[in-house]
Image (cartoon, rainbow, N blue to C red):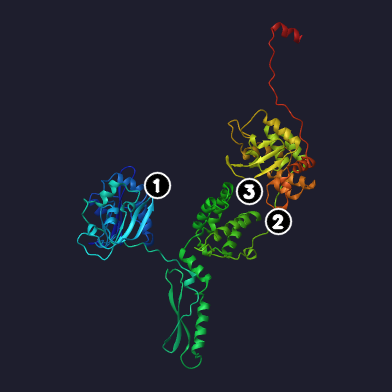
Amino acid sequence: MQVAVLQSFVAVLEFQKNGNAHLHVLLGRYIPQKQISKAWRRSGGGRHVDIRFVDVHRVSAYLSVYLAGDKVLHTLELLPRRARIFTTARCIVLWGKKKNSGWWLRRVDLSSLYEAAANPSNVRFEAVEDLKPFGLELLSYFESPPLQEAIGNREFSNMACRDFSRVVEERETVAEHNDRVGFLPAGVVLQFAPATPDKRTRRKSMSRRSGQSGYIEKKGNAFYVRFWIDVPGQEKRAHKSIRICPTTGLGKMTKPERERRAKQIIAESGADSEEHLKAVQAVNLGVTFRKQADWFLKHVKTRKRRPIKPATATSWTSHLAWINLVLGEMPLASVNNLAVKELVSRMAVAGFSPKTMHNYVQVVKMVVASAVNEQGEEIHSRKWNHEFIDLPQVANQRKPTFTVEEVMKIVSAAAGHLRVLYALLSGTGLRIGEALALEVKDIFEGTITVRQGVWNGILQTPKTTNGLRDVDVHSSLAALVKAHIGERASGFLFQSPSGKPLSPSNIRNRSLHPILKAMGRETCGFHAFRRFRVTHLRKNRVPEDLIRFWIGHADKTVTDGYSKVKEDVSFRMLCTENAGLGFELPSPVREPRNEVVPICTQSELVSQSA
């Protein structure tokens, strides 16, 4: 096969990091590898030629790798200035020629033109930071009839002048801009392309679609109604035509009947319905579940209203990593009850617990609901059917807690600061992150102030706003904490030798779990201490709103907002002392000290041993 003329091609030059040059040529037709390799060697190239098929829809993605990013910067560094790294066939036009008409650029002070104008209009002034203290503004724009000082001998009906220094982009230096534009001395007129305003893309609106009556026309032996309707896969609406009735004979309708029938046809087609518009928008946008999930994660972490905590973000990221294996490449418009049913069936095969399935499905619902239009309304409104999805009910969920005897054994088995930590968790119900984030300044007599938490060694605000609270401590536990602090005046209550917060996972794996295994009990987390404390407070009939305040939970009813029990410090302290800890603290154990060997002579040592 011999090819004399190439119909179309795009060539891009690339320099690898080792300095070797690669030439990427995208051809419009197939040419055998041997023929290309032979021609390439004759022109001075190497003998290795790699041929790959690039789909027409992926041409831009293939070329963008070599036209943007680090590869382009590296290639441009090895080429002379103003050298191009790509070329095309003559039949491919990247940029059309500009027409010389419209605006002229003049290096003339705007104020001098304004003073020369006879009747300036639409005068605009802009505030400048440096002139604000003096209450002055800078002239930036005005319109007037043609000025001889500005256009010379040219004849135009009107002209507009603006401060050119504000048109040049800030990222360009003056030298680069002058070199690119080619400024001439004052008085010389430059030709530029016409300044056309940016045309804003018109968004699809329901107000332009509702209330269609259609246009009834006669074609052949029948009447038809024509109306506009959105079509999936098309940006513009289609002009659809549907038959109404014959012009004569059986089924003929009068004019009012035809008009009523036309409106029925339009209503049945859904052309005027918001649901049809949302469905078409979803298909046209072509957003996949994976892409929407990535946007959702970034949004919930940075939004102003209730941004999620890093722990929650890590958990949801883990959920989506598994969900994307099933739903990731599916269009977001197709993620419905049927798609979630398939997800639940796969989770059941993988051995997920019912509670884990609920958590994963909840993340899917939030991702789908996060797609909204310009009015803030959901694009993919769903009525989720758990019965159809076959989502199992959560029953017999594992919620371990400790008994009084188990708490006493755990506290007694621990030593040093961990004994104080376990006693504090059991006697207050603090979360482990809140307890490890406590500082010495947060302890004041019989009250602990919770203002922060710790996660992965990073200090942050508590889980919710209700976590900001004061927790009253029993006098015996307060004495234990005070003895643990000693003479310290700053730092964390529980800290490492370097002064940083302790790691919850290290405490759980190295201390709590070994103690529970030695007791012959199933291992669990720190939340069992919170359940123990809540159970003890309820057994002693502590007011329910006071329990929620100490634990850091939200009010349950409107009546809780009327209660001021949590503001009565003396009553809170009384309830704390009356309720007690629920367990007995072990007697203080002194840390073992190394015995000092006495200094004696050998004869004294022999006589003592005799």
Viewer-proximal residue among 109 and 79: 109
Mark seen at residue 465: 3
Occupied quadrant, residue 103: bottom left
The secondary element bearing badge 3 is classed as: helix
Viewer-proximal residue among 229 and 63: 229
Alpha carbon distance from label 3 to label 1: 45 Å
In the picture, measured across the screen, residue 401 lies left or right of residue 440, that is right
Please state the horizontal and vertical placement of residue 134, each as a whole percent of the image: 40, 47
Residue type at mark 2? Val
Mark 2, residue position: 558
Residue type at mark 3? Thr
Task: State yes or no: discs 2 and 1 in contact (Cβ < 8 Å).
Answer: no
Please state the horizontal and vertical placement of residue 83, each as a whole percent of the image: 26, 49
Q: Nearer the viewer, mark 3 or mark 1?
A: 1
Occupied quadrant, residue 194: bottom left
Rate crowding at label 2 as few (under 14), some (14 to 19) or many (20 or more) other CA atoms within 10 Å: few
Quarter of the rendering occupied by the N terminus: bottom left
Q: Residue furthest left?
A: 153
Quarter of the rendering occupied by the C terminus: top right
In the picture, measured across the screen, residue 62 lies left or right of residue 368, that is left
Mark 1, residue position: 134
The secondary element bearing badge 2 is classed as: helix
Question: Which comes before the other along the chain, label 3 or label 2?
Answer: 3
Please state the horizontal and vertical placement of residue 228, each as a whole percent of the image: 45, 76
Q: Is residue 68 above or below residue 516?
A: below
